[in-house]
Image (cartoon, grey):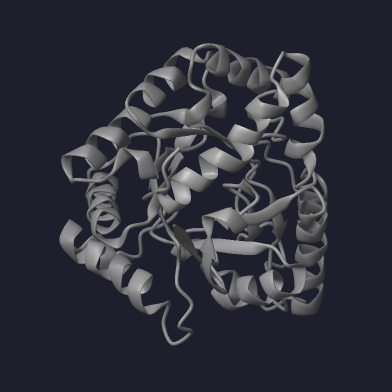
Amino acid sequence: MQVMSVTGPVDEADLGRVLVHEHITIDMPGEELDPSYAPNMPEIVARSVDQLQKLRDLGVGAIVDPCPIELGRDPELYAEVSQKSGVKIIFATGFYMEAQGIPYYWRARDAQEIAEFYLSEINDGVGSTGLRPGIIKAATGLDASPLERRVLAGAAMAQRDGNVAIITHTENSRHGDVQQAIFAENGADPSRIMIGHQDEQKSAKPIAALAANGTFVGIDRIGLDSLASDDHRADMVAQLVRGGHRESICLSQDCVCNSKAPKVPFALSSGAEITVEQFLGNMKPMTHVLTVFADKLRERGLSEEDLDVIFRDNPRRLLTGAAE
């Protein structure tokens, strides 16, 4: 079984450890209009390569960058970083949530038209680059709007026909059950879906309920202390493992290596005014989940076998459709 990476198909045996939600860069439409916009691409590449090489030294063979189309997705950048770092990058087709995404033209399209667009990228590549996404990104905001539900239906249709995984964004960990229901109604394979961003749940119980419905669940904002503590995340992961859901858990950090923007390209919840360099510097390194956080899991009784299942087997099955 294989998954498509930005540099071509990857056999499941060659994936190694996989982080399922990390970002080379995140950028917002319109930042390129700022008169001071002048991204230093060699520096962006070098910073990304450095992060990924440190992951490679820890046994990571691939990362998933599920950046939606509207938030600065850059397949050609991913290809350069992958080639120079030796780590495979699996990138996405798919739109973001309504509040920050879904281009106006596509808001007027039906679910089938959205699915056909996603499939065109999966089968033929992005634009003239020929670079093919290996997953679909799907998202809901605070209210799971009618437009977001239609886009979710399109993602499900494309997943059904395109033989790829879906990785989702849930705002404040809400509406994972809504996402699952819409995917099921439209024929998606639950074993190729990860309901993401479950870090903000108050307990492991609602996460276990999602896992019981047959999808993977993502505790994938590890290290983002403003959303939840890593001790709370580790407690929930340990509870999920003890509850029989080890084979459903995926871990990652939603780390951002870079931004091309001259200023932080989105409003911060704290309201603080900081530079892009300060914003990036506040991020934990991409190795954090495999070092500091993994040790927290060991302290809570997880074995090396448990960690191997979570970091190797689960992403492999999600991304390739491989059996146990």
| Residue at 78% from the left image edge and 45% from the top image edge | 287
38 lies above or below 278: below
Q: Quadrant of residue 47?
A: bottom right
Which residue in the rendered view is the most extreme toward the bottom?
128
Residue 70 image offset from top left, x and y in percent: 46, 64
136 lies above or below 43: above
| Residue at 68% from the left image edge and 67% from the top image edge | 261
Front residue of this view, candidates 140 and 213: 213
**Split into 4 quadrants, where in the image is the C terminus?**
top left
| Residue at 30% from the left image edge and 54% from the top image edge | 159
Q: Is residue 268 visible?
A: yes
**Split into 4 quadrants, where in the image is the N terminus?**
bottom left
100 lies above or below 24: above
Front residue of this view, candidates 232 and 292: 292
Front residue of this view, candidates 269 and 62: 62
Q: Is residue 140 visible?
A: no
Front residue of this view, candidates 67 and 30: 67
Residue 50 image offset from top left, x and y in percent: 83, 62
Residue 286 image offset from top left, x and y in percent: 75, 47
103 lies above or below 215: below
| Residue at 56% from the left image edge and 72% from the top image edge | 74
Q: Is residue 253 left or right of residue 322?
A: right
Residue 219 image offset from top left, x and y in percent: 57, 32
Q: Quadrant of residue 7?
A: bottom right
Q: Is residue 62 left or right of residue 201?
A: right
Q: Is residue 156 left or right of residue 36?
A: left
